[in-house]
Amino acid sequence: MIHRSIFLNILKSEFPHLKKELNSQYGVFYDEVNVFHNFAQGLIEIHDEIKLQLAFELASNFYNKGNNKMKKAIDVCFVEGLSFRENNWAWKLFPSNLKVLYKEFHGELKS
């Protein structure tokens, strides 16, 4: 099972530039996941397909292998706030398990 410490170590390893911002969240897990969300949303906005694919894969894995707290945080802090407006290319990269969560909150994606 993936716990918070593993989540943070993986994010800091894959995206070292997030380390300072992650460390500044004073151990508040939902805020740390929100840093990850903001990073992913930024990748959508700048059309960075390679990094976004990795971020989505990590989020999917964190959700699939995480404890209940991890699952809830990925759902609420990462998935629900993502915006795919005019970015269908990013929706196509979004893992199916996370699409289910997104649709449960937002309904079907409208083009």
Image: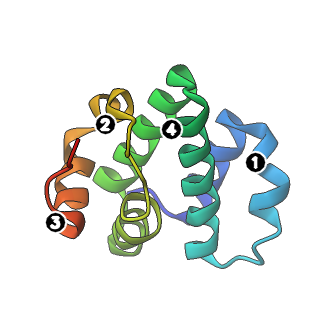
Q: In the image, what residue type sits under mark 2? A: Trp
As measured in the structure, the alpha-carbon distance from the residue carrying label 1 to the one carrying label 3 is: 29 Å
Q: Which residue is mark 1?
A: 18
Identify the mark nearer the N-term, 1 or 4.
1
Identify the mark nearer the N-term, 2 or 3.
2
Label placed on residue 107: none
Badge 2: residue crowd in 10 Å (few <14, some 14–19, many ≥20): some
Is 11 above or below relative to 25? above
Q: Which residue is mark 2?
A: 91
Q: In the image, what residue type sits under mark 4? A: Ala
Q: In the image, what residue type sits under mark 1? A: Leu
Determine whether label 2 and label 3 are within 8 Å by CB: no
Is 93 above or below relative to 99? above
Q: Which residue is mark 4?
A: 55
Q: Which residue is mark 3?
A: 104
Q: At numbered mark 4, what does the secondary structure look like: helix, strand or loop?
A: helix
Q: At numbered mark 3, what does the secondary structure look like: helix, strand or loop?
A: helix
Q: In the image, what residue type sits under mark 3? A: Glu
Indicate the position of residue 23 as horizontal and vertical percent values.
80, 64
As measured in the structure, the alpha-carbon distance from the residue carrying label 4 to the one carrying label 2 is: 13 Å
Q: At numbered mark 2, what does the secondary structure look like: helix, strand or loop?
A: helix
Q: At numbered mark 1, what does the secondary structure look like: helix, strand or loop?
A: helix
Q: How many marks?
A: 4
Badge 4: residue crowd in 10 Å (few <14, some 14–19, many ≥20): many
